[in-house]
Amino acid sequence: METVYEVIKKQRPIFAKEGTQTVRYEVTDNFLRFWFRYIERNRSLIEIGNFEGLSKIMLDDYPTYSGKTLELYFKQKMQESFSYRAIGSWWEPKGNQNEIDIVGVYLDDKSAVAVEVKQQKKNFKPQLFEEKVKILKTKELNKHTVESLCWDLADM
């Protein structure tokens, strides 16, 4: 599925080595991502005609789903700018809660950007994010100047 059809993609934290076991898989196609998240997973609801239940599940989960889609949108925009040598997400190995939605290392390899993606900026917690960026800077970007940002729908 990964190499022949390119339906799924192996994701590693942005600075992880090729052989690391810190891996996540994601569905690459938007339609299939939606299908597997809502339709296939809730097939029994559809089979018994419980569309109201399906609708509730979808509406409750949609902010999480659309947040990931928004994150992918911003990563694509960063790629299209040709300003970065590396773009990806960053998370610590098992047991740690630190994760940053998008990290971009600029072409100069001296500066970087760490981005938290939110539907609305009011949900952004700057102090918590700065703690995560501090850990990222200590572990991976100690020689870089790192700018911390929050992007939301208004930044599209």
Image (cartoon, rainbow, N blue to C red):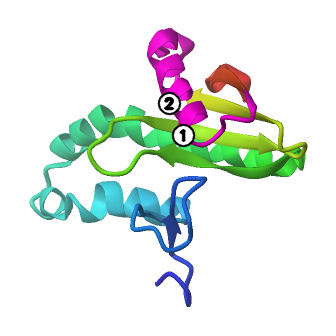
Is 99 drawn above or below residue 87 in the view shown?
A: above
Residue 118 appears in the rendering: no
- Which residue occupies the extreme bottom position in the image? 4
The residue depicted at 42 percent of the width and 63 percent of the height is: 23
| Snapshot quadrant of residue 153 | top right
Q: Amino acid at mark 2?
A: Ile
Task: Specify whether residue 126 is painted magenta.
Answer: yes
The residue depicted at 31 percent of the width and 38 percent of the height is: 61
| Snapshot quadrant of residue 148 | top right
> Badge 1: few (under 14), some or many (20 or more) residues near its Cα, within 10 Å?
few
Provide the residue designation for mark 2. Answer: 135
Is 138 drawn above or below residue 69 in the view shown?
A: above
Instruction: State left or right for residue 35 relative to residue 136.
Output: left
Q: Amino acid at mark 1?
A: Lys
Is 35 drawn above or below residue 60 in the view shown?
A: below
Q: Magenta segment range?
A: 117-145
- Asked whether 144 or 4 is in front, the reply is 144
Q: CA distance from mark 1 to mark 2?
A: 6 Å
Label 1 with label 2: CB-CB less than 8 Å? yes
Secondary structure beneath label 1: helix
The residue depicted at 16 percent of the width and 42 percent of the height is: 53
Q: Which mark is residue 66?
A: none
Provide the residue designation for mark 1. Answer: 139
* Count of numbered badges drawn on the protein: 2
Q: Position of residue 3 (x, y in %)?
A: 55, 86
The residue depicted at 60 percent of the width and 32 percent of the height is: 137
